[in-house]
């Protein structure tokens, strides 16, 4: 295996089109490569760092995320789908890594900084939240991941992981840990804008279309989408930039010629919002229907999904245990 990929999501909500475009599609593609093995981690422990008082939220979403994975075509025969909290070697590695990281360094991590702002922790930052970049370094190094595909927002996490791996190897004269490379999405393939056009699609902004949404919900959301606020009468020329309907058509419609024709018509005037929304609705329904149907099929047997997660976690634990052995040996704390 030349490439070992580690990816993951916090199970704090169901997965939406932003996840689909930003990472899920790509994971399914990478899974096809015979030289690649992917670990897909449901990062429930990380989700708990800011949900300690509401563990049921994490617990409920865990199976939903697993269903979303299966629905888009992640195949547990080829990829290892695992639950972070079921791998005790991860917090053990974290304890050792924490000694190599300063409070000042953690304080500088821009991702954590902006999340602290977003979540309004002020002076009451949970210690577990504050140090989650170190726990994420354990996630990545435990499986000797060579590549980690993440969005731009997670770049500081990868930088910190690389620092920890390098420092560990240098300090303990070992090559036990692998310094992973970051795989960023290609330009223009960053996270998808939400249906309100205001920000990236996210649960907190309530502007998402979910993989589990019904056909009706999808239609309602498409019909309420942000377009060009100055496009009042059908005959008015309309604007494409910032028009969510066209942004989505660019992403989801494979018929590029048709999209170009619609854009030309819209800009010239004479093409109404309702028409383009109806068309986008058709395009999205065609994409999402098979995903939703597969999801419903898997959801009929939740016990089978749990069995799959258990098997994936057990497989992952064996790999992490091997790494932990090497780590302890390098540190000279393999006493018995
Ligand atoms: N921090 C990631 C997120 O919230 C989730 C995650 C946890 C992760 N561990 C990981 C991603 C390891 C990549 C690699 O989106």
Image (cartoon, rainbow, N blue to C red):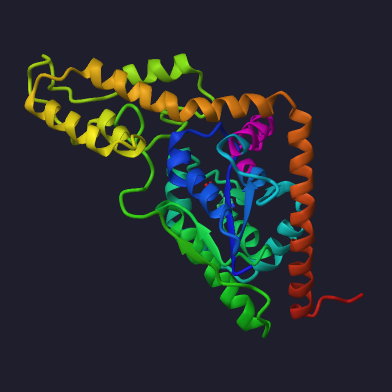
Q: Nearer the viewer, residue 139 or 50?
A: 139
Range of residues picked out in magenta:
47-69
**Main SS of residues in magenta:** helix
Q: Is residue 6 above or below residue 265?
A: below
The residue depicted at 29 percent of the width and 38 percent of the height is: 250
Q: Is residue 104 above or below residue 45?
A: below
Residue 7 is a magenta residue: no
The residue depicted at 27 percent of the width and 24 percent of the height is: 226
The residue depicted at 43 percent of the width and 23 percent of the height is: 285
The image quarter in which residue 42 lies: top right
Give residue 302's position: percent from left, percent from top: 74, 28
The image quarter in which residue 293 lies: top right
Horizontal side, residue 317 vs residue 181: left or right: right
**Residue 88 appears anywhere in the view:** no
Give residue 93's position: percent from left, percent from top: 71, 64
Q: Quadrant of the C terminus?
A: bottom right
The image quarter in which residue 10 lies: top right
Give residue 154's position: percent from left, percent from top: 46, 54
Residue 59 is a magenta residue: yes
**Residue 168 appears anywhere in the view:** yes
The residue depicted at 7 percent of the width and 17 percent of the height is: 235
């Amino acid at each position: 295996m030349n490439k070992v990929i580690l990816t993951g999501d916090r199970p704090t909500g169901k997965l939406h089109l932003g996840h689909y475009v930003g990472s899920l599609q790509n994971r399914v593609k990478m899974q096809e490569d015979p030289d690649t093995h992917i670990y897909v981690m449901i990062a429930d422990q990380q989700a708990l760092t800011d949900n300690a008082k509401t563990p049921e939220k994490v617990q409920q979403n865990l199976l939903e995320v697993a269903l979303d994975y299966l629905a888009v075509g992640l195949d547990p025969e080829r990829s290892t789908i695992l639950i972070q909290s079921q791998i005790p070697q991860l917090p053990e590695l974290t304890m050792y890594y924490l000694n190599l990281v300063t409070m000042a360094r953690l304080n500088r991590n821009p991702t954590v900084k902006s999340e602290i702002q977003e979540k309004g922790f002020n002076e009451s930052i949970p210690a577990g939240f504050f140090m989650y970049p170190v726990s994420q370094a354990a996630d990545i190094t435990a499986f000797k991941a060579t590549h980690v595909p993440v969005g731009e927002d997670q770049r500081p996490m990868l930088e910190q992981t690389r620092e920890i791996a390098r420092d560990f190897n240098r300090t303990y004269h070992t090559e036990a840990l692998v310094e992973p490379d970051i795989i960023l999405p290609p330009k223009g393939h960053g996270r998808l804008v939400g249906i309100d056009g205001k920000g990236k699609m996210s649960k907190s902004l309530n502007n998402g279309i979910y993989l589990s949404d019904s056909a009706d919900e999808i239609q309602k959301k498409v019909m309420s989408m942000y377009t060009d606020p100055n496009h009042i009468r059908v005959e008015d020329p309309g604007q494409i930039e910032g028009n969510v309907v066209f942004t989505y058509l660019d992403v989801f419609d494979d018929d590029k010629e048709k999209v170009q024709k619609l854009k030309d018509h819209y800009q010239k005037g004479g093409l109404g919002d309702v028409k383009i929304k109806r068309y986008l609705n058709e395009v999205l329904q065609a994409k999402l229907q098979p995903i939703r149907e597969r999801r419903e099929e898997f959801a009929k047997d939740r016990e089978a999904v749990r069995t799959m997660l258990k098997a994936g976690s057990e497989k992952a634990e064996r790999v992490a245990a091997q790494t932990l052995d090497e780590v302890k040996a390098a540190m000279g704390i393999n006493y018995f």
